[in-house]
Amino acid sequence: MKVKKNKGYFGAKYLLIAYLLVSIVLPIGFLFSNIRGGNVSEVLSSAQFWPMLKNSVITTVIATVISVCLSFALAWMINRSNIKFKSLFVVLFTMPMLIPSISHGMGLVFLFGDNGIITNLLGLNINLYGYTGIVMGSVLYSFPVSFLMFNDSFQYEDFTIYEAASVLGMSKFRQFLSITLPSMRRTIVSAVLAVFTMIFTDYGVALMTGGTAMTLPVYMYREVIGMMNFSGGAVIGVVLLLPALVAFIMDLRNSGINASGSTVTKAYKIEENKTRDTIIYIVLAVVIVLLCLPVFAFVLLSFVKQYPIDMSFSLETAKKLLSSGIGQYFINSVAIALLSSLVGTCLSYFSAYVTARSKKSVSNGMLHFISMLSLAVPGIVLGLSYVLTFKNVPIYGTIFILVVVNIAHFFSSPYLLAYNSLSKFNPNLEDVADSLGINRMRLLFSVYIPGTKATIVEMYSYFFVNAMITISAVSFLMNFRTMPLSLLIPQLESQSFIEGTAMVSLLILLVNLLEKGIAFAVKKKIAKEDANILAPPLETEEV
């Protein structure tokens, strides 16, 4: 009777597994099947391969160290001080996540390139093109991810341990080394792996600022897009996939470290120290100014006639973009983002519901593993895999293939958000529902979805923002009819229309800021409604 009663639930579960197998596992299998021994030897023996690998490794290691250290320091400053407007600082530090990586590279070119704003204004040449530009752009692009990890972890530290250390006479510096760093070990490892993978597989920053220092992702992009060399691109794709797979396996093993440290016995108590807070205000302000410089450059260059020849205010750039059909690219981007958000949120939430609220089984374990697998597949590798797998399928060359690849690319993080939220519910709910004759789908819509509305909004927002900014997964799958706004940036840059690239970057930022504002307002409304539901009834005076 129970199986029959939950027939729709099990049917949906196996359909979801089949979909994820086709959209995630099958393309990676096709990537490996398209590699021949001759292709491997040809790529590995080429004069370019080892210098490109060296460039990729050196820039990635340097940028990862700077990015993780910077994000750790900023998160520590915010959470270990009594400064005001902490939420505002968090929002500003995550703003670089709202524009494509290629825009960070373009922003640096606008500021520090041979004809950059700061280069011309101060006569300062930092030799941007090469390692310097790749590292700077990669830090801008990646540090918000690790910052969010550290900012979240700092809020779960137990102050009881610090109190005991103070009683024993341990200095603040010793407490930092002996308590703070060990308690952050799991987050530090996860942040390093996440940032390293992001930078190593990104081609946007290096494409704009690399100069003669070509990296593997840039080489793969040019081989596939420029020369249609899919076999050579597949070999590079596997090379890019290996560090991500290693990071994925290490992160899974790391998930057991400090697992018991998330339960807070006592919230961290921050001592009053005006000098410390003043210094932190200054440091945070300087970082925010540096973060906002590329945005300032986008705004300035979007409304000048011709940089750097004629800096007078002009709407000529907007007119040129409108006449060149930017409206269609904008509609494509928004449509892709909306569809990816809607479908991706539904699929990832249901997947999390199955794995978090069901007993362990082979099918549930498989679903959990596949749902996590996209963390290990870089977007540029996934995009090429889709070309090799679906080039003869009817949806190839349409917006729908871009939606499918975006869902596969960004599936894991929203899945984990929902999985963690659903795991917090009482473990006996399903048994109670079965005893009352309530099926699983009704339980989903009547209990879990209303109880996790804020998480669902966050999942939707994650899919939307990333679908708007991505350039890696969709680069090989788009055409001029389906091209999203983000891929207009390298096209305009190749035409030396830098004012146009600035305006497109600014437009993407404004759309994502609007979406984030809407998401914030919705979550605030949800929190208010939940507070009203949980509030005790008003006492009435007995007459």
Image (cartoon, rainbow, N blue to C red):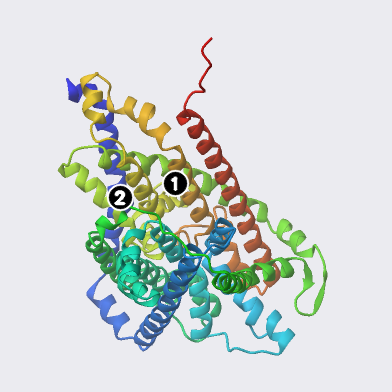
- Asked whether 103 or 416 is in front, the reply is 416
Q: Quadrant of residue 257?
A: bottom left
Quarter of the figure that contains the C terminus? top right
Which residue is drawn at the image coordinates 65% and 86% (left, top)? 114
For this view, does 192 lie left or right of residue 366? Answer: right
Residue 493 location (% of width, % of height): 62, 72
On the image, numbered disc 2 is attached to which residue?
371
SS label for mark 1: helix
Residue 95 location (% of width, % of height): 56, 61
Outermost residue toward the top in this view = 543
Amino acid type for the residue under numbered disc 2: Ser
On the image, numbered disc 1 is attached to which residue?
459
- Asked whether 171 or 343 is in front, the reply is 171
Amino acid type for the residue under numbered disc 1: Met
Mark 2: few/some/many CA within 10 Å (<14, 14-19, 20+): many
- Asked whether 394 or 459 is in front, the reply is 459
Mark 1: few/some/many CA within 10 Å (<14, 14-19, 20+): many
SS label for mark 2: helix
